[in-house]
Image (cartoon, rainbow, N blue to C red):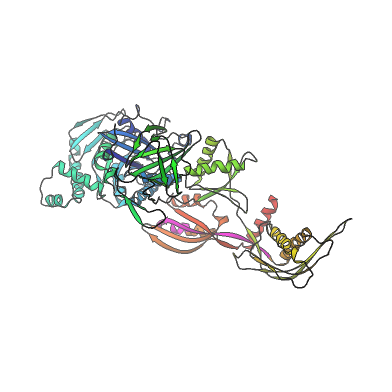
């Protein structure tokens, strides 16, 4: 069937982990006849959670995309992760959506993850529908959940349906617009019978229908006047205004049901195709002219120049790399060339695909709103724009969430470090939130991510896709050493006389401490001819090498100046080697006399927490030798600006999670070095000696 943009709906499913997004996706696929049976997460038959890491943990780790046909429309389902560790993927993937369904678990209400993904939808300006799920479960409470949603999000939350029965007696829905009852068979088939509203619900139905109409008429002034003058509104009027209100985000409709039993899902799908916007109803996509700040935009028309955004990359060891993009304007055909303005290169490709869970289906061309995959692009990465070369545009991708926890990655097989590094680099293409760096000071491979499970799942994937096994270890803190007092006229003579040619060199140094963060300075201040000038580079080299390992705990030495002002040489026995050794030993001698001390890295932090736990978080920071520098409030949250020693916050992500029930977030970056308090310095020095 030909896919026209007006019949397309790109819908992201978003929620806190475990609310039932993937089960809802499975019910939609089944009702739309994309699958022949209802896939289930719990018995590993899901079409959307297919990576082994997802099956093992029973959570979505990576966004999956599939589509279903419904009432002559195509719904592209973007099933996103809800677990905190993988929310960055959710945020990236929502760039491909035109609207979202927010799934809320009726047994748990609004959770922190719900608030986070709701904020993503706000940031991207996506109209939304709420689906209250799991009404068949014990302790499910529709009205309590509804109140929770209304209190948290302060929008016009408007139920269009009420549940019939509760918990194990949950049997169907009452439609408040059409004033009908739908009773479902509980076999997961999604079949229902239409009948009259149960008599014992009539009072409740009247009350909620009144509230619903009050909210809906807000979207249309003429209808509002009619309503206020007491005129009877037709079901058609109410429905048309509702659909207008959803698209303008004046009304946020609520549908209820059970994804596992496929109750309420057909009604949700009908609302998706009628009430959520097609790609043509979204505002033009804003971008910039490459290399300039000139704003340009692309209307969602197939006549406009081709433009698209890469929102996801999948690294497949067999198929190579799959680049997944959302087309915003123009047409893209198989076997053609696209332009990447960020990398300033042309990319040739063969077949276009649409994603069907873990499978791909080849297609000939794609237009506005289509979500397609291309294999084996060489340069293109997540966040890049692909467009027409003769009329280029650059779209600004969303910022990935910051990495908050780091581990050192150690190869299980000695000597395979390079393979570890290159294989991890491939996973970075797939997951832009991962950070990979080699610490020059400790020569460790450092992997950073958005949480413990994020990094563990990355290591599982590394083993499965590339056959590389690694251990995660705590990161070494890159301490430094420095001196506190100047020493004058330090003299060292290197002399060796053993048959044949000897070695002779003598150097005279002044060594002084410098300001924090200055590094190392070398001053050549020789007068007279005691030392031939051709030995000066050897002296500097000897000092540089000696600075690599300090005398306290073997950490690099920083922030000092060496003035080389005199020395002695021998015309036969002096050599570059002799001067290099003399310089190195002279510096070590000077360090011992110059009151050496240990420095530690201090991190700058911004911690966002709910107001009620702020006291605990600040108390905890003080216990970590942290300093609070200031605070500002943002809605229900407080932002604490602070500094703390790196050694005290290596596992801060895990501790903040438990202090705030998962609602706290933070970012941190290196700020400066400071002296380690004496009693702690002793411990660090002892540990370093023990390791040697």
Q: Left or right of 27: which side holds 691?
A: right
Is residue 257 placed above or below 630 in the rendered structure?
A: above
Question: Is any atom of residue 345 visible in this view?
Answer: yes
Q: Tell me which corner region of the image, top left, top right, bottom left or bottom right, holds residue 146.
A: top left
Magenta highlight on residue 614: yes
Residue that sits furthest to the right in the current view: 499
Task: State the extent of the magenta-drawn residues as a range.
Answer: 596-617
In which quadrant of the rendered image does the N terminus lie? top left
Which is nearer the eye, 35 or 396? 396
Is residue 246 rendered magenta in the image? Answer: no
Q: Say above or below: 352 vs 566.
A: above
Prevailing secondary structure class for the magenta stretch in the rendered image: strand
Q: Residue at x 61, y 51 (%)?
A: 476
Q: Residue furthest bottom?
A: 527
Image location (x, y in percent) of residue 300: 30, 45
The single residue placed furthest to the front in the displayed view is: 390
Residue closer to the observer: 488 or 688: 488
649 relative to 638 in the view: left or right: right
């Amino acid at each position: 069937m030909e896919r026209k943009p007006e019949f397309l709906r790109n819908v992201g499913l978003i929620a806190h982990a475990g609310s039932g997004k993937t089960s809802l996706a499975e019910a939609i696929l089944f009702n739309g006849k994309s699958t022949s049976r209802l896939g289930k997460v719990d018995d590993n038959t899901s079409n959307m959670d297919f990576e082994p890491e997802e099956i093992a943990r029973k959570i979505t780790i990576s966004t999956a995309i599939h589509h279903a046909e419904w009432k002559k429309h195509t719904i592209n389902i973007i099933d996103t992760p809800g677990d905190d560790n993988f929310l960055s993927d959710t945020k990236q993937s929502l760039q491909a959506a035109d609207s979202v369904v927010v799934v809320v678990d009726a047994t748990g209400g609004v959770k922190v993850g719900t608030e986070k993904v709701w904020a993503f939808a706000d940031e991207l300006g996506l109209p939304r529908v709420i689906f209250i799920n799991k009404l068949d479960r014990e302790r499910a409470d529709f009205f309590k959940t509804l109140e929770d949603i209304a209190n948290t999000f302060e929008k016009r939350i408007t139920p269009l349906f009420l549940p019939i029965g509760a918990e194990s007696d949950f049997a169907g829905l009452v439609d408040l617009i059409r004033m009908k009852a739908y009773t479902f068979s509980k076999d997961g088939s999604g079949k229902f019978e239409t009948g009259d509203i149960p008599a014992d619900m009539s009072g409740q139905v009247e009350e909620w229908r009144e509230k619903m109409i009050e909210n809906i008429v807000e979207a249309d002034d003429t209808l509002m006047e009619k309503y206020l003058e007491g005129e009877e509104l037709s079901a058609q009027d109410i429905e048309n205004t509702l659909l207008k209100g959803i698209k303008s985000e004046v009304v946020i409709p609520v549908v209820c049901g059970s994804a596992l039993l496929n109750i309420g899902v057909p009604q949700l799908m009908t609302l998706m195709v009628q009430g959520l916007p097609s790609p043509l109803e979204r505002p033009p996509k804003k971008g910039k002219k490459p290399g300039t700040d000139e704003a340009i935009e692309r209307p969602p028309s197939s006549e406009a120049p081709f433009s698209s955004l890469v929102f996801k990359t999948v690294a497949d060891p067999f198929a190579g790399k799959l680049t997944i993009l959302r087309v915003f304007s123009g047409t893209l055909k198989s076997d053609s060339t696209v332009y990447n303005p960020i990398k300033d290169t042309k990319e040739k490709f063969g077949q276009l695909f649409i994603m069907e869970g873990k499978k791909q289906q080849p297609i000939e061309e794609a237009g506005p709103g289509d979500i397609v995959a291309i294999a084996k692009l060489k340069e293109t990465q997540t966040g890049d724009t692909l467009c027409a070369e003769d009329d280029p545009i650059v779209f600004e991708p969303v910022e990935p969430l910051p990495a908050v926890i780091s581990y050192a990655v150690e190869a299980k097989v000695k000597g395979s470090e390079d393979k570890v590094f290159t294989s991890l680099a491939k996973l970075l293409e797939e997951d832009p939130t991962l950070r990979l760096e080699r610490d020059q000071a400790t020569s460790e491979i450092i992997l950073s991510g958005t949480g413990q499970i994020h990094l563990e799942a990355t290591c599982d994937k590394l083993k499965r896709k590339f056959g590389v096994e690694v251990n995660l270890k705590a990161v070494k803190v890159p301490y430094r050493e420095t001196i506190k007092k100047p020493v004058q006229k330090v003299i060292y003579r290197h002399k060796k006389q053993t048959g044949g040619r000897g070695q002779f060199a003598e150097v005279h140094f002044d060594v002084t401490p410098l300001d924090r963060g200055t590094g190392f300075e070398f001053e050549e201040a020789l007068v007279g001819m005691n030392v031939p000038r051709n030995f000066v580079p050897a002296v500097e080299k000897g000092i540089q090498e000696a600075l690599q390992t300090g005398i306290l705990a073997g950490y690099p030495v920083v922030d000092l100046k060496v003035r080389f002002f005199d020395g002695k040489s021998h015309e036969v026995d002096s050599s570059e080697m002799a001067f290099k050794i003399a310089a190195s030993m002279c510096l070590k001698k000077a360090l011992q006399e110059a009151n050496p001390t240990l420095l530690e890295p201090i991190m700058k932090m911004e911690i966002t927490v709910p107001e009620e736990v702020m006291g605990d978080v600040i108390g905890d920071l003080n216990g970590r030798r942290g300093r609070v520098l200031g605070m500002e409030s943002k809605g229900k949250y407080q932002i604490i600006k602070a500094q703390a020693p790196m050694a005290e916050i290596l596992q801060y992500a895990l501790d903040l999670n438990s202090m705030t029930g998962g609602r706290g977030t933070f970012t941190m970056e290196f700020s400066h070095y400071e002296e380690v308090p004496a009693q702690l310095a002793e411990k660090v020095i002892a540990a370093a000696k023990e390791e040697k």
